[in-house]
Image: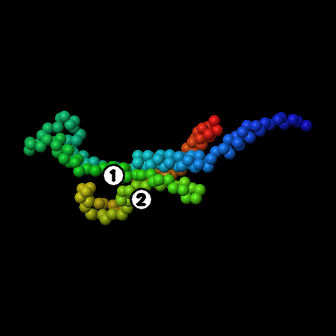
Amino acid sequence: MSKWGSVKFDGLLELEKQVKKLHESEIQRFCEQCANDIANELQRRVKKNTPVGTKPLWAFERAEMDDIVSTGDGVSKREQLEAHWAGYIGGNLRRQWEVQPLAWEGNACVIEVINHAEYASYVEKGHRQTPGRYVPALGVTLKAPWVPGQHMLKTEGERMRGQIQAILDKKMQRFMKEVLG
């Protein structure tokens, strides 16, 4: 008959004692921190992929600003350019992304990443439009009956879903090292 050797369970018993010392509040704080970190990372990625309005180009914008000369009517091209851009507002959709405060629903930790811009859902999911209609704000006549969505939130949510387990594993290892030494 072969001998299997001896096993010492002292280390496991010590680990069990340390894990039992963990308070519910420490575990809850860890879960909330993980959820906040994941939501903030999702917000960062979604903001990065959110489209921003395109600026109209003038022919003289390509020239160096020092080379721009006046047009003859007393107004320089620099002043014309500054006046042209004075009313431009871009990046509103990107600025509106927000992480809502954490909420507990039973044993689940819930955080929402939302956009407050009233047109955010149209950019995300797509929308219908009337071909032939002139839009003064854009300076164009609409051509297509459907504008496809950009799917910033959906795409990044799917990408994050595949990476969450790896993120949580790293955080759990750090937490266990902190707590258990």
Q: Are marks 2 and 1 in contact (CB under 8 Å)?
A: no
Number of other residues with Cα within 10 Å of mark 2, as a class: few under 14, some 14 to 19, many 20 or more: some
Residue shown at 58%/59% (left/top)? Answer: 106
Dot 2 corresponds to which residue?
A: 125
Dot 1 corresponds to which residue?
A: 92
Q: Secondary structure at mark 1?
A: helix
Quarter location, residue 144: bottom left
Return the x and y of residue 65 as percentages of the image width and height: 20, 37
Mark pair 2, 1: CA separation: 18 Å
Q: Is residue 88 left or right of residue 33?
A: left
Extreme-left residue of the structure: 73
Q: Secondary structure at mark 2?
A: helix
Q: Earlier in the sequence, mark 2 or mark 1?
A: 1
- Can see residue 148? no
Compared with 179, 56 (above or below) is: below
Extreme-bottom residue of the structure: 130
Residue shown at 54%/49% (left/top)? Answer: 32
Q: Is residue 178 left or right of residue 94?
A: right
Q: Nearer the viewer, residue 39 or 175?
A: 175
Q: Which amino acid type is shown beneath numbered disc 2?
A: Lys
Quarter location, residue 104: bottom right
Q: Is residue 67 left or right of residue 119?
A: left
Residue shown at 63%/36% (left/top)? Answer: 181
